[in-house]
Image (cartoon, rainbow, N blue to C red):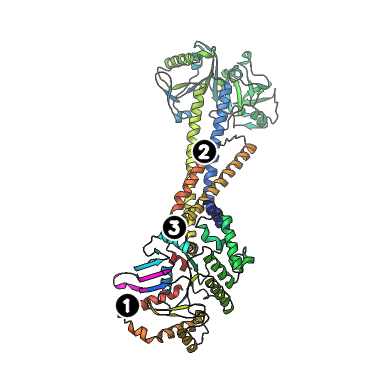
Amino acid sequence: MLGGNIKMAMAALRSSKWRSLLTMLGIIIGVVSVVTTVSLGEGVKKQVAGQINRLGSDLITIRPGQVVTRDASGNITKINLSSGLGINSGSLPANDLGVIQGTPNVRLAVPISLISGGARTEERQYNSGYIIGTSEKMPEVLKQKVNYGAFFTVGELKRHVAVIGQTVAEQLFSENVPIGMSFSIHGQEFIVRGVMDKFDSPPLALGPDFNSAIFIPYEIGKQLAGGNVQLSQVLVRPGKPELTGATIAAINKRLTAAHGQQNDFTVLRQDENLAVTSDILNLLTGFIAGIAAISLLVGGIGIMNIMLVSVTERTREIGIRKAVGATNRQILGQFLVEALVLSVVGGIIGTLLALLINVLLRIFTNLQPVISWPVVLLASLVVLVVGVIFGITPAAKAARKDPIDALRYE
Amino acid sequence: MSLIALKDVSKLYGFGDATTVALDEIELEIEQGEFVAVMGPSGSGKSTLMNIIGLLDRPTHGSYTLGNRAAARLRANQRAKLRRDKIGFVFQSYNLLPRLNVLENVALPLAYKGVSVTRRLKRAGLVLEQIGLGDREYFMPRQLSGGQIQRAAIARALINDPSIIIADEPTGNLDSSSSRLVMELLGEVHKSGNTILMVTHNPELTRYANRVVYMHDGSIVHDERTPIGQVPKLARRTMQLFPRKTEEDDLAGVSALMKALPGKLSARKKPKAKTHKRSRKAPRRKAKN
């Protein structure tokens, strides 16, 4: 009977193709948007995780502001999302770098300080990137290679030299290897020493995209900023990776003392960094997917609407079916299956469309969406539930019809 | 024992002052193998009687036995199943489902019995073959003539080997030659042992029946047996008085028939209020036919 019902329902839907398609549109849009947003979020999360893992678990990041709240034993109890997104009141003044460098077991401590301003050559101007003051150890601490030329050395820390990301090379000089060429920041001339290998920066990652960054020596950056510079991050590699925990505790203690017992900074292990990023991404994707899910509800209402119309239109058919012996339950089943077919077919089309969009995104953008099968499953389940909930009222209406009146219906 | 036995069956609509009586204490027994023609003017309760016998409706009072089963007080679900197994309907307006082909239409009652698709289509094919529509199996109803559609409808009514076939003006929408074909088919069906209950306005068609029942105002006013092939006396009289040309003549003929039964009518004195209500009801029913 069920198989027959499905076949019958398909025939009924085929007989009014446009109407069925438009009815399914709500469900299709809902499924596509939910699945796509979640898979985008998952993809970004995976890229972030990949990058963070590549950097190694012993990398310590110190950031301004209280990004996380810890309990006494150092476990994260709460992630402060606004701080994580960059809205915070904390700061890392320049001399914190010395404090961190002086901590035992700190092998490398590399400052990342953002300096305002844009770069220009005689022909072009480049304002959309970042100017980052850092030290000669930056490639080592980020395990990043220099593609052409070399990073600036200890001896060049007081000189106007720069290493640029790939995007900068393309956009400021429109060539891949602009080594030896010069540009100016705030009227001061810099010479390009090298071009970095491509950073595999995830699209929605927090923090600057290093591919569009101009790295200059930290001290020069300080001068450019008028001597007063804030650190946006300090990256630390401990001497002994197994002592990472102790090192974090030590940095924490020293910085707290240096900040006058104010805890307005955060020292994060790499896995904690991942947790913070994932948390923020989860919030964002959840929020967008939630909005998208509303269209599933609207789609359900559309199905109910069209089923109510269909039941009225087919009153006579219901009468005939009852006359030849259909019970109320069989009529209910027929119309319920029809509503279900509408919603499920919509769900299937939506899922296929979402898969297609995924492939297209992978081909044409640098996004790497990952289809999250639990979400596809959940969406299918929701679609099924929507079909039942919004199909049951029209189906019950059909089943309750009096056969005599239904047979007379014109 | 009779196949169908109605005892004191009444059907009332509305309540209180607005009560209308559609059937008034009907007594009717139909034996296995009878071909009963029911005649009467619009609003005389023919359709209500068909609906009750066909288990589409329930009587307000009285008892109805179908086969050996008390059917008057059954719930909708049980009525549907009994309808499926014991009753075959043939309607004036054919009532095939337009989206199904002839074969699927004929097989429809079996679907609700839970017969598998292949088996029910096979059975439907056999029945269509028997009634001479074997070559129209895969036609859609709209591709057939009225007579062919009605014959397919008769095939649908036959598919479950029903105890009784209820035909409500089966030739009402057909021209005379198609009518004859359909009636010949019903006659054949009757000859092979089926019980048929047919409503008609056309006295000519009573020649296929072996019993004619006349209704008026919700009551059976005359019940006569007649050999097959003959139009019974009363019906013939209305035919001679008003040679049938149109449907309206037909209706007038039936009214004349009712007038020709003075004894029966005057014997049934009705309260004035009731007849008044009936006349108010009449236009509604007419509109729905």
Instruction: Give the number of the mark in front: 1 or 2.
Output: 1
Q: Most extreme residue toward the left, as rendered?
A: B16
Decide: few, some or many residues near mark 3? Use Cα within 10 Å; few <14, some 14-19, many ≥20. Answer: many
Residue A357 picture location, percent across and down = 60, 42
Q: Is residue A312 visible?
A: no
Q: Which residues are magenta?
A: B1-26
Location of mark 1 (residue):
B274
Which sits in the foreground, B25 or A398?
B25
- Pinpoint the chain carrying mark 1: B
Query: Disc 1 marks which amino acid?
Result: Lys
Q: Secondary structure at mark 1?
A: helix
Query: Disc 2 marks which amino acid?
Result: Val
Q: Is residue B149 visible?
A: yes
Q: CA distance from mark 2 to mark 3?
A: 36 Å
User: Which disc is residue A206 wearing?
Assistant: none
User: Which disc is residue A375 wearing?
Assistant: 2
**Callouts 2 and 3 close, C-beta under 8 Å:** no
Sequence order check, earlier mark of 2 and 3:
3
Q: CA distance from mark 1 to mark 2?
A: 68 Å
Q: Most extreme residue toward the front, as rendered?
A: B1
Magenta span has A384? no
Indicate whether A134 appears above or below A207: above
Location of mark 3 (residue):
A328
Q: Secondary structure at mark 3?
A: helix
Q: As drawn, is B280 to the left or to the right of A85?
A: left
Decide: few, some or many residues near mark 2? Use Cα within 10 Å; few <14, some 14-19, many ≥20. Answer: some
The reply to whether label 3 and label 1 mark residues of one chain is no
Which sits in the foreground, A261 or A328?
A328
Q: CA distance from mark 3 to mark 1?
A: 35 Å
Indicate whether A179 appears above or below A410: above
Indicate whether A165 appears above or below A155: below
